[in-house]
Amino acid sequence: MSIPPLVYRENRLYRRVRRMVNLVIAAIALLVAAPILLLCAIAIAVDDGFPVIFKQRRIGRFERPFTMYKFRTMKKDDCGYGVSPTQPQDPRITRAGKWLRKTSLDELPQLFNVVRGDMSLVGPRPEMPFIVEQYDTWQHLRHLVEPGITGLWQISQRSNVPLALPEATLLDLDYIRMASPITDGVLLARTFSAVISANGAF
């Protein structure tokens, strides 16, 4: 596979503005979505008990590990480190989990990661350590920026192209090349239509 060259120059002003915007949007979103967060938690608890929050180590910027939060969508015994579901009929997914994954509501707790600074609203999707260990050298370039809740891969491919594949990493590098406030705004706007269509969401 031919890998386009990546020239990365950090724009400190952009990073400061993005961090401020991330904090404001994430805080407002958490306040507005509080009733939805509660309903999701109740649905999970009624369907499959506690815990309702799934915590997992992921790899962030400069390959620093962090704990990512999601609503639990799989059975408690299947919540370890493994390949993510690639089809809605995956037996590991709970009844409530199918609905949460289809609507992407399982991702809402990652707003806390944004507030903490582990993640950005927009950026490459963070991967599990055991998958990152299998990367080709060039794929580690995706860790030049903070991982995001949404991004180019998330809205254009999602589960249609597994994140570990080189094709997905190329999309991440495309984002890094053109990252800007305008790019982030466009990707956030496109996220809403991607969530509504639920294309590739399992």
Image (cartoon, helix red, strand yellow):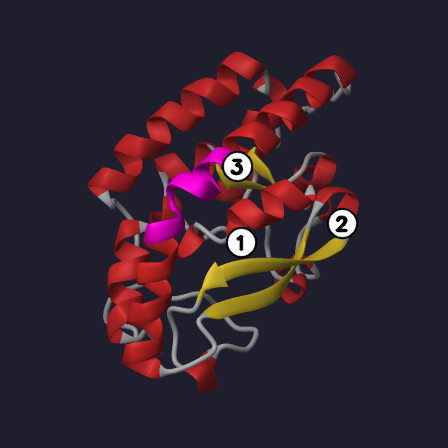
Kind of residue indicated by mark 3:
Ala
Q: Are marks 1 and 3 in contact (CB under 8 Å)?
A: no
Name the image quarter holding residue 59.
Answer: bottom right
Magenta span: chief secondary structure: helix
Q: Which residue position is annotated with label 1?
A: 164
Kind of residue indicated by mark 1:
Ala
Name the image quarter holding residue 61.
Answer: top right
Q: Which residue position is annotated with label 3?
A: 26
Q: CA distance from mark 1 to mark 3?
A: 27 Å
Q: CA distance from mark 2 to mark 3?
A: 23 Å
| Residue 175, horizontal then vertical, whole percent | 55, 26
Q: Which residue position is annotated with label 2?
A: 63
Mark number displayed over residue 128:
none
Residue stretch in magenta = 26-35
Q: Is residue 158 above or below residue 101?
A: above
| Residue 148, horizontal then vertical, whole percent | 56, 40
Q: Secondary structure at mark 3?
A: helix
Q: CA distance from mark 2 to mark 1?
A: 15 Å
